Image: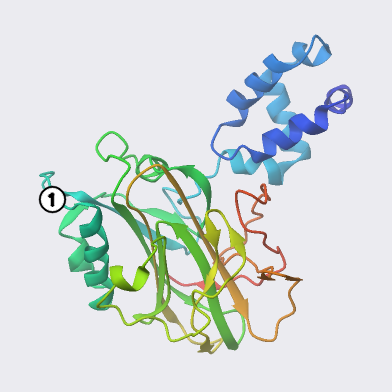
Amino acid sequence: MKSIFCILTVKNMKEYMQTIIMSLTVSARVFILKIRASLPASPVKKISPAILAAALAAFFPAWTQAAERNVFGEKSADGAALIGIFYDFKQTQKGEPAMVNGDDYWRVLDEFFANGWDETVLNRYFRVVKPLYSTQIFIPYSSAGAGPKAFDAGPRVQPTRWVIHYKGQVAPPSAGRWRFWGCADDILAVAVNGKMVLLSPFHQKPREAFRRVKWPENPATYAPGLKAPGGRLYSGDWLDLKADEIYDLDILIGERPGGEFFAFLMIEQEGATYEQTPDGPVLPIFQVAPYDTPVGRDTHEPRFTKNGSVWRCVQ
């Protein structure tokens, strides 16, 4: 093991390690094959990808876990987690064309939100039978096809006009005033006890797209926030919460035209101390279980602190 460690510290290995860290969608084994092929003639080329992957996992577990984790959720939950259901607006439950175009996509969501997040609206459309379980919503830039693929629906669902509805029952780590921050390409919305508290659509005229929705009351919503891919994070309403009380939480993310996708959901507690930047505070990721989220490139995801408190999820 000592000799392997020495090999891993050769000149320029730092650059290769950074490249490996940034790769969140390629398996460690395949990625190392590519890295090894790009290296000049050296003892490193004599080391098998399996040995390199094992060495990385041994010395850098927080970095290598990203290569295996499904950022949309896992097929089984080790503990309580948010349950995610995938819907495709382009087809009915019977697999017939649903005739939902790009503008209709917003209208369906407007109806869903206006009716208090009524799942009967979504159930008109194709629903993947098996859910995923997630403890956070922090999905870096990826192909719009990554959503259907994560739910094993890639062959049946084209990467446009889909949504994922996450839900669960949660309790904050302490009493106080809290608010969510978030953004997505193309939609991220959050409701607590059935009330919309954050709505962040990737739309030039969002209030025209959502005419029936009762928008969050916070006047700071849609004010400049923390920088994120394609725009900024936006803040939702402040919530007065009790530590011993359970709250129904609904989160929706979705993709309309295809292309690329991302989604980020952060949390802020009033009175807590955060690093301040010209764009706003550097916030923790909203989590319902501990997870050491790998830090990526600033241009591909918002900055975040790892000092946040984890919420409790009971269902």
Q: Is residue 145 above or below residue 214?
A: above
Quadrant for the N terminus in the image: top right
Residue under pointer 1: 98
Are there few (<14), some (14-19), or many (20+) residues within 10 Å of tag 1?
A: some
Quadrant for the C terminus in the image: bottom left
Q: Position of residue 70 (x, y in %)?
A: 49, 45
Q: Nearer the viewer, residue 122 or 205?
A: 205
Image-based side of 52 in relation to 147, left or right: right
Q: Residue at x 34, y 39 (%)?
A: 152
Q: Position of residue 91 (x, y in %)?
A: 16, 47
Query: Please, what secondary structure does the residue beneath circle 1 have?
Result: loop
Q: How many marks?
A: 1
Q: Is residue 238 above or below residue 17?
A: below
Image-based side of 235 in relation to 291, left or right: left
Q: Nearer the viewer, residue 181 or 227?
A: 227
- Amino acid type, callout 1: Ala
Q: Position of residue 285 (x, y in %)?
A: 60, 64
Q: Residue most toward the front? A: 204
Q: Residue at x 23, y 58 (%)?
A: 103
Q: Nearer the viewer, residue 222 or 105?
A: 222
Image-based side of 177 in relation to 43, left or right: left
Q: Is residue 136 visible?
A: no
Q: Position of residue 211 (x, y in %)?
A: 26, 76
Q: Is residue 218 visible?
A: yes
Tell me the quarter of the picture where residue 44 sits. top right
Q: Nearer the viewer, residue 91 or 71?
A: 91
Q: Residue at x 48, y 87 (%)?
A: 245
